[in-house]
Amino acid sequence: MKRDFLQLVSERTVLFDGGMGSMLIDAGMKPDECPELWNVEKGSIIKDIHRLYFDAGADVVLTNTFGGTEIKLGTRALEKRAEELNKAAVRNARSVCKTNRYVAGDIGPTGKFLSPVGDITEAELYQSFSRQTEALLQEGVDIIVIETMYDLREALQAVKAVRDITSSIPLITTMTFDKKKRGFFTLMGDTPEKCFSALESSGVNIVGANCTLESKDMLELCRLVREKTPLPLSFQPNAGQPAVRDGKVTYPQTPKEFAADIVQLVEVGASIVGGCCGTTPEFISAAWEALRKRI
Ligand SMILES: [Zn+2]
């Protein structure tokens, strides 16, 4: 039987995979294409990406379902295919998952805003997250990861949707913060303190942050949150601050620089680390190498 994931997190550092988006672009995905559609139309490419991450040393890969809610897929008139695309994504990851490695069902933001910024309702968010969760669970994910959340209220609807379906699946929720003069804030103005205390009482097992910040700022944030919550922490920084060169988004960090910062994240208290935008299997491999004594 596979080792209990939360038990593993309590025993050693756990390494997640890196970015999916940049890998898809490198594989030829055009900006107007829907990444989730590739789960059925180009499944072998998705499997190859997952395989590369497992080979690099990742304990966990995230399914290619970041935009897999009906609301988000609806912006491309694909909402009726939500169940199919989410299930295909899990099968792709499962098919290359090794013994004692894990597949995490990935849930990202819907892209719509609650009042007063937008007109989506909490009930609509809840329903959309519920349906995505059902599909991910039916196909057998080991973990659920709700990530890159920039509105605490939306994150809480996603958590509620998952927890109303199952109380047993390990649930990680990571918010995305910007660094301002006065500290760290989500796009909607939530502080880390507010986010993590609300998530803590909502039934999440692990909290943290991903995306937006490069690893140095993530380190500062990690130090700050370590004092605020007793829950294990998960941090996935980008490979530095993105810049646009020749119409292409590039990230400045080398795998080695990234890996050095990842080690520091672990030293200040992160139990789970991995990469977000701009990171590739090379970055995860470098992180694994740097962390090998702890893994
Ligand atoms: Zn990212």
Image (cartoon, rainbow, N blue to C red):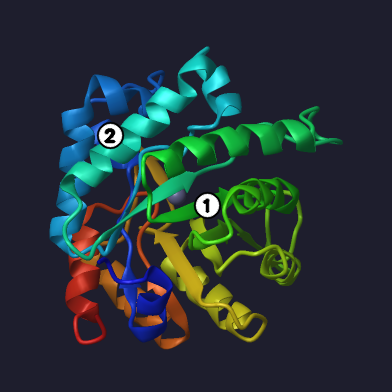
Which residue position holds label 1? 147
Give the image location of residue 193, x and y in percent: 72, 72
Asked if the residue at tag 1 contacts the one at tag 2, i.e. Cβ–Cβ closer than 8 Å, the answer is no
Which residue position holds label 2? 24
Q: Residue furthest front?
A: 1
- In the picture, measured across the screen, residue 76 lies left or right of residue 257, that is right
Name the kind of residue labelled 2 in the image.
Answer: Leu
Q: What element carries label 2?
A: helix
Give the image location of residue 49, x and y in percent: 20, 43
Q: In the image, is residue 30 above or below residue 15?
A: above
Residue closer to the observer: 192 or 82? 82
Name the kind of residue labelled 1 in the image.
Answer: Glu
Q: Residue furthest right?
A: 116
Give the image location of residue 166, x and y in percent: 57, 53
Give the image location of residue 236, x and y in percent: 42, 62
Mark 2, other Cα within 10 Å: few <14 / some 14–19 / many ≥20: some
Quarter of the image for the N terminus: give it: bottom left
In this orientation, does residue 247 appear? Answer: no
